[in-house]
Amino acid sequence: MSTEGLLAYLSAAPGDAAWAAALHRDLERCLDYSGVTGRVFWEAEDVPPGVVVAGAQQEGVDRARCFLLVVTAEALADRRVTDLWQSFHRLAQRDPSHRLVPVIVEEAPLPPFLDGLRPVIFDPGDADHYRRGVGELLAVVLARSEMPALPEDLEAPTFPARSLPAELRRAG
């Protein structure tokens, strides 16, 4: 496993893997399109068989400048996901150039610290909104104030099914 050239770490719960895989693919594709050398770590693709997953995850967290947390009710209830973003948060407290970005896929009650961060919100079924969200994430990953150009044929993936009843979702 290589964390060489790592720009960001993408974290998602197992039930969100299909959507996260599409986002990961699109972020990497957009980095290439922008001519940027660097990559986004996602353990589902970046930890080869036979490697201790927890060690590989921690190495990715330690080397990433950005942590992209795919927020769903499942992700917020997942102990592994929580351990990872909290580990990154401890690093970010020592280095303010680190960014923890909630990537809102479904409304869910956020822990107090995450609730205070500016998220990137993805709206189901809106391809333009997906493109805008990918652009916002890339701007954060690349530490730019403006969104980079994106490939024209970028398509929004299918969102995970909502797992929380409407009355329990975060108002927003």
Image (cartoon, grey):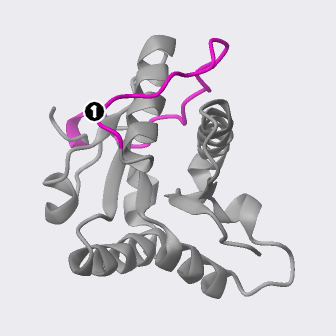
Q: Nearer the viewer, residue 151 or 57?
A: 151
Compared with residue 86, is residue 161 higher up or lower down, i.e. above or below? above
For label 1, the SS is helix
Q: Is residue 71 visible?
A: no
Is 156 inside the magenta-drawn segment? yes
Query: Which residue is tagged 1?
Result: 166
Is 21 inside the magenta-drawn segment? no
Q: Quadrant of residue 164?
A: top left
The magenta span reads: 144-168
Q: Nearer the viewer, residue 74 or 58?
A: 58
Residue 160 percent location from the top left of the image: 55, 36
Residue at screen point 68% across, 81% down: 53
Prevailing secondary structure of the magenta residues? loop
Q: Quadrant of residue 77?
A: bottom left
Residue at screen point 42% across, 60% down: 67
Residue 169 percent location from the top left of the image: 25, 40
Q: Quadrant of residue 50?
A: bottom right
